[in-house]
Image (cartoon, grey):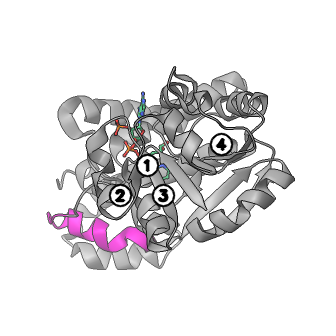
Amino acid sequence: MNIGIAGTGRMGSAIAARLIGLGHALTVWNRSPEKTKAAVAAGAALAASPSELATRAEVIITILTNAAAIDAVYYGEQGLLAGEVKGKLFIEMSTVRPETERALAEWVAKKHAQLVECPVGGTVGPAKEGKLFGLVGAEPQALERAQPLLAQLCRRIEHVGPVGAGAAMKLAINLPLIVFWQAFGEAVSLTKPLGMDPARLIEIFSDTSGAATVLKNRGAAVAKALAGEDTGPAAFDLDAMRKDLRTMLEEADSLGLELPTAARVLDVFDHAAHAGHGGIDGVRIPAWVSGQA
Ligand SMILES: NC(=O)c1ccc[n+]([C@@H]2O[C@H](COP(=O)([O-])OP(=O)(O)OC[C@H]3O[C@@H](n4cnc5c(N)ncnc54)[C@H](OP(=O)(O)O)[C@@H]3O)[C@@H](O)[C@H]2O)c1
């Protein structure tokens, strides 16, 4: 099957590596061409525009920053929907608002193609290993078509409703995750007078109800950050978390809801970003919050 990926950022590149590793024929496109180099070196073909990519591929995957990126990549003059897309399948994996996905599904249907919305839980590592958690919003028949490919990318696929439902679930899941990084940093501050070894602190926390699952998965990296060690390139950074928090707050506003904790964490993260910390990974946030970075 010829698969296209429009958007080879961190997640798109990891998914590309996974699909090439499984032997799929892949075509890639990215706004900044240098980010396609790794996929092309691994065997992917390069498309000159999103429309060319959509014309070449049978299934098109997108995983992009936000609604503005979706606008540019799908609806632009040389966008995906300007290609020959009749009968094709789009799998949209970005973390955006439900209305963005619903509007896109309508446009895709007008072009006689199908859309499966599948935002994902899990970061670059799980994406490379095919161990994402796919939160699908789709018509059952469209999902049936996407299922074999999604099964190669995800350890678990949950069909949570029609298009838009996946986005709602993804935003909801990221709220406690993002707040946790800030809360855990505050908790670490309280333990500073104990002078405890970071690895031991993480190990104790991870065996209690005070820890989120992410600490069990990423605890070793958090301990490294607390010890002042390098944790490698950022996968889910503070700027991406700010984007998610803003998206949650916009969504809550449209539903007549308030999210006071998310709003407060966004304030704190905005200050951090303005002080030059927007690129730090989540695993470094506790060290930064507790003054150990
Ligand atoms: N990183 C994670 O751990 C993670 C996990 C789950 C879900 N997600 C979600 O997955 C999506 C991608 O995340 P990522 O970490 O891969 O981000 P990233 O590395 O910053 O990549 C973002 C991608 O969007 C493209 N893009 C942004 N604005 C654009 C525009 N106006 N026109 C065309 N292309 C545009 C970028 O192109 P350029 O290279 O040209 O900028 C790049 O391909 C986001 O919605 C994020 O919330 C991320």
Which numbered disc, 1 or 4, marks the residue that appears first in the sequence? 1
- Figure quarter occupied by ligand 1: top left
For label 2, the residue is: 39
Pointers 3 and 2 in contact (C-beta within 8 Å): yes
Which numbered disc, 4 or 2, marks the residue that appears first in the sequence? 2
For residue 216, above or below residue 291: below
Left or right, residue 144 beside residue 45: right
Secondary structure beneath label 3: strand
Instruction: Indicate which disc residue 26 carries.
Output: 3
Q: Is 217 one of the magenta-colored residues?
A: yes
Separation of residues labelled 4 and 3 (CA atoms):
26 Å
Pointers 3 and 1 in contact (C-beta within 8 Å): yes
Seen at 60% across and 51% down, the residue is: 173
Q: Picture coordinates of residue 214 (x, y %)?
A: 46, 65
For label 1, the residue is: 28
Q: Amino acid at mark 4?
A: Ala
Q: Amino acid at mark 1?
A: Val
Separation of residues labelled 3 and 1 (CA atoms):
7 Å
Secondary structure beneath label 2: helix
Q: Is 286 one of the magenta-colored residues?
A: no
Separation of residues labelled 4 and 2 (CA atoms):
27 Å
Seen at 59% across and 33% down, the residue is: 83
Q: Picture coordinates of residue 36 (x, y %)?
A: 33, 49
Secondary structure beneath label 1: strand
Q: Quadrant of residue 148?
A: bottom right
Separation of residues labelled 1 and 4 (CA atoms):
24 Å
Which numbered disc, 4 or 3, marks the residue that appears first in the sequence? 3
